[in-house]
Amino acid sequence: MNMKIRPTAHKKHNKTMTIPSVSGVDLFCGVGGLTHGLKKSGITIRAGIDLDTSCKYAYEVNNNAKFIGADITEVTGEQIKEYWKDGEVKLLVGCAPCQPFSSHANKLKGKEQGDKWNLLNEFIRLIKETTPDIISMENVPNLSNKHIFKDFVFQLENKGYKVKYKNVYCPDYGIPQKRRRLVLLASKLGIIEFIQSTHKKDNYKTVREAIGHLEPIENGERSKSDVLHFTTKLTDINLKRIKSSIPNGTWEDWDKSIWLDCHKKETGKTYKAVYGRMSWDEPAPTITTQFYNYGTGRFGHPEQDRALTIREASILQSFPAKYKFVAKGNDVLLTQIGTHIGNAVPVNLGLAIGKSILKHLKENGNG
């Protein structure tokens, strides 16, 4: 590969270091969590592709990149190649929708079928059609046990890529959320090692550090300064429940008069986190697409009697506090934006991936 090298201002031991010019395309880009993190690391992402065109505004306005609204099965390698320049390190990244592989998808009972199972096959098709220098794929940890993932790795290795993957605990990289993700890195230059963790248990970023500074709001109230900082109003019974909840507690802390019927059954006793409060002084639980619904997980605010707001959830996903999810004057669609945020790759995980790629390039004589 004849890859262009450009100098940077970084110095080490009084010697100027260089970082290769890297350009990428982000498959299944959503609102840009992975793209934004890669850009923060110094990598150029010129385009993102996603079937959900409601992501277009947030993706483009925050990332200065082209959003392509398309079904991945209809995208060709030639279309992707248009966003790469000669002499650059060519990067292809993506996070195929993870619902089929998640722990919530046990109903599939190991059946690796359906349209979404096929998205990894579309990813490998585009890799074969474009032959990027470096690949990154991010998904849920359960995927690593599936045949479709093992086949994905096998096909990469057959094409001459060196492949590494690991399950990453997000707090280890400054993300204030107990999310676990599978990260795969592949390169034609050699093995890419994921960078060492930046945080340890004694200095994990906490809920308090992430959102403790935000304006307090009441149940059902909207902030006057931020259209994304609001909550829907809890029912009377749920307001009683959250007032009876303690951080990291369970519904067993409540008076039995406000228990749900399912809590009184043996099967309901395993769901201890629902209707729970987060704790100020540790990372948040995994942010799902239903974070705004107090009854779907431990999404009660640590102190205020309400569920999380869009702004709070986005910050817990390590999006910048000023990240724009909706155009000024447009309606804020809670379900839609909730899906965008819950499905996003945490920005700081993208940053760690980017740093790993750049470190790899320097170590392999491209810096």
Image (cartoon, rainbow, N blue to C red):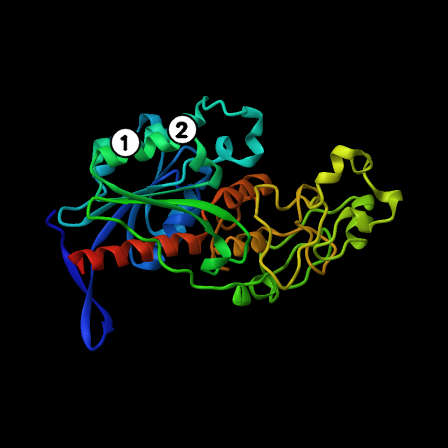
Check the image and report above or below for 18 versus 228: below
Which image quadrant: the C terminus? Answer: bottom left
What label does residue 155 carry, if any? 1
What residue is shown at x 24% (from left), y 49% (from top)?
23
Residue that mark 2 sits on: 147
Coordinates of residue 337 in the picture (x, y in percent) = 54, 43
Using the image, determine if residue 322 lies above or below residue 66: below
- Label 1, secondary structure: give it: helix
Position of residue 178 measured from the top left corner of the image (x, y, whole percent): 55, 52
Percent of width and height locating residue 137: 36, 41
Q: Is residue 70 left or right of residue 345?
A: left
Residue located at (17% from left, 61% from top): 6
| Label ID, residue 232 | none
Q: Position of residue 207 (x, y in %)?
A: 60, 61
Amino acid type, callout 1: Gln
Q: Amino acid at mark 2?
A: His
Q: Is residue 78 above or below residue 289?
A: above
Write down the quadrant of residue 50 in the picture.
top left
